[in-house]
Image (cartoon, rainbow, N blue to C red):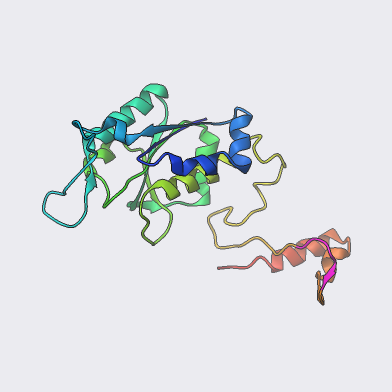
Amino acid sequence: MKIQIITLFPEMFEGVLATSMLWKASDRGIVEYSYINLREYGLGLRHQVDDTPYGGGDGMLLMVEPLLKAIETAKANDPGAKVYLPTPRGTLYKQSQAKQIAAAAEGMVIICPRYEGYDERITEWVDRQFYIGNYVLTGGELPAMILIDSVVRLLPGVLGGETSTEIESFQDDDVNIEFPQYTRPENYDGRPVPPVLLSGNHAEIAKWRAANSQSA
């Protein structure tokens, strides 16, 4: 899977994508990350990428021309890639969508908005608009990282364990949270592991886990 990131701050991704499972996925050839610096597509001598909004208002918007040029470059690299835009105008991103994207195994082009947002006309070239929560961030880089992490970990060969991605929280977009888990020591400072987990009775352990899957 090719993942192309359109951003003014590619350096923000370097530590994240070069660490742990995201790095392993790249090292194993399962995924390929690349950056498209939006500034390189800016207009004029100053490589301008933003301008004031029509109708007035505070802040600046990313302009349609630089964004479209960056998208066209990304699509030339991977014509079948889908374009993603983190925005409050999208739908709430859920685990089912991560599964869907990973199963499709299509390339991803992720736009990272900045400032007060973007020229709305760019959405004509966007396949999916999404948001990650009801709060405001300084840019789209963190939502892009969340999208990448949630999808890449589901690709075959990344985590390794056969059921690693099956017994987890939010598997069916519901509010069930994975049961509590424990490891050694059996008793830490008067805080013991629940006896049922030490019993070896798998049926009872399954019942305990089901009963202790909390709801938000």
The region drawn magenta spans: 182-188
Whether residue 69 sits left or right of residue 93 in the image: it is left
Whether residue 14 sits left or right of residue 127 in the image: it is right
- Tell me the quarter of the picture where residue 50 sits: top left
| Horizontal and vertical percent position of residue 52 | 16, 48
Q: Does residue 65 show up?
A: yes
Q: State yes or no: residue 205 in magenta.
A: no
| Horizontal and vertical percent position of residue 179 | 69, 63
187 or 213, which is in the foreground?
Answer: 187
64 or 154, which is in the foreground?
Answer: 64
51 or 117, which is in the foreground?
Answer: 51
| Horizontal and vertical percent position of residue 112 | 36, 43
User: What residue is shown at x 59% (from left), y 53% (from top)?
Assistant: 171
20 or 90, which is in the foreground?
Answer: 20
- Tell me the quarter of the picture where residue 111 sits: top left
Q: Does residue 154 show up?
A: no
User: What residue is shown at x 49% (from left), y 48% (from top)?
Assistant: 146
User: What residue is shown at x 88% (from left), y 60% (from top)?
Assistant: 200
Whether residue 165 sits left or right of residue 216 in the image: it is right
**Magenta stretch, main secondary structure class:** loop
